[in-house]
Amino acid sequence: MDFDTYERDLWDGRADAYQRGFARMTAGSVGPLLDAAGVGPGTRVLDVGTGPGIVSAEAVRRGASVTAVDAEPTMAATARANVPGLDVREAVLPHLPLPDAAFDAVVGNFVINHVSDPDAAVRAFARVLRPGGKLALTCWEMPPSGALSLVTEALEEAGVPFPDDIPTSPFMDLGKRGPFAALLRDAGFPDASDAELRWTHHVDPEDWWTTGALARVGTNGVIVSRQDAPTVAKIKTAYDRLATRYATPDGLLALPANALIATGTR
Ligand SMILES: C[S@@+](CC[C@H](N)C(=O)[O-])C[C@H]1O[C@@H](n2cnc3c(N)ncnc32)[C@H](O)[C@@H]1O
């Protein structure tokens, strides 16, 4: 299966589960992302891979004029519902059905790691930015750790092998300090730099399990969804044990979110 085919299937119909689970974690980088792109009153912003629209919502709250795109129809519909009046287009990156030099800022929260050709996507972002416009992108730091690896470790402990037919993301190599900035530099952003972004996601352990692994969100969710009931039970036992490392006295998990942010000027 090619990477884009896998990605379309990965997100198909996932908007509701994603917004109840993962999006509460990705919300942690929205402020730094918009700050890095200089988003404020009147900024013409393009939010790529908007998902349920959490970046767009905050940009609108800051007084920006926002356009959003997503490849997944249920995500686009959810963003429209969450951010009244938001101009949301359905488009699969690197295709961007938007005019040249139309934006002051392009922002993408955890989308660049989901495209098959990140270089072509960044070139498309450069095309729609005006000279002097800002690009800011986040990705998960590779190899996965903290919040991102809890279910992975549970799958490993339960003896579930990584399936042969799931393609590897180009971001296994690019999701590192240095290569992430170089991606932007080589695709039209000569001053690009990258930095670590760290926060803690506080979440109920059962919610994290049911809105992620059990709801087929993310690759771990896809792998869990392919298992029979006894194997899922085994993965859950491992998950419960491994999750205790992050347990807080109030019964939540304090999951480390380990991301990178890359910024550049057109
Ligand atoms: C991890 S979610 C991030 C959503 C949101 N930005 C956030 O901060 O939570 C990735 C989103 O990118 C979208 N996506 C994945 N590949 C895409 C592509 N090639 N073009 C456009 N959107 C894509 C998915 O449909 C999904 O909504």
Image: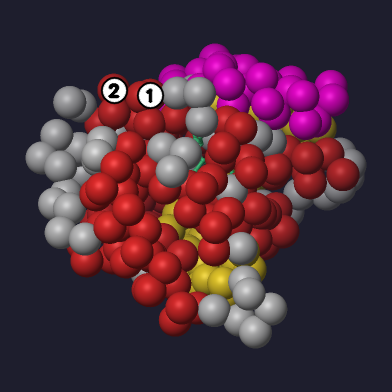
Which image quarter is the C terminus in? top right
Residue at the spot x=69%, y=44% of the render?
55
Residue at the spot x=44%, y=72% of the render?
243
Residue 5 is labelled as 2
Q: Out of 22 and 53, give the one closest to the viewer.
A: 22
Q: Please give left or right for residue 25 compared with residue 243 in the image.
A: right
Which image quarter is the N terminus in? top left
Q: Disc 1, ligand 1: is the CB inside 8 Å?
A: yes
Q: What element carries label 1?
A: helix
Residue 171 is labelled as none
Disc 1 residue crowd, few under 14, some 14–19, many 20+, Cα 10 Å: some
Please, what is the three-letter code of the amino acid marked with disc 1? Answer: Arg
Disc 2 residue crowd, few under 14, some 14–19, many 20+, Cα 10 Å: few
State the image coordinates of residue 127 (x, y, percent, origin top left).
51, 29
Q: Give the range drawn in magenta.
A: 72-99
State the image coordinates of residue 220 (x, y, percent, origin top left).
33, 48
Q: Which of the 4 image quarters holds residue 8?
A: top left
Q: How many labels does the image show?
A: 2
State the image coordinates of residue 192 (x, y, percent, origin top left).
47, 58
Q: Name the residue under label 1.
A: 8
Outermost residue to the left? 164
Residue at the spot x=40%, y=53% of the render?
185
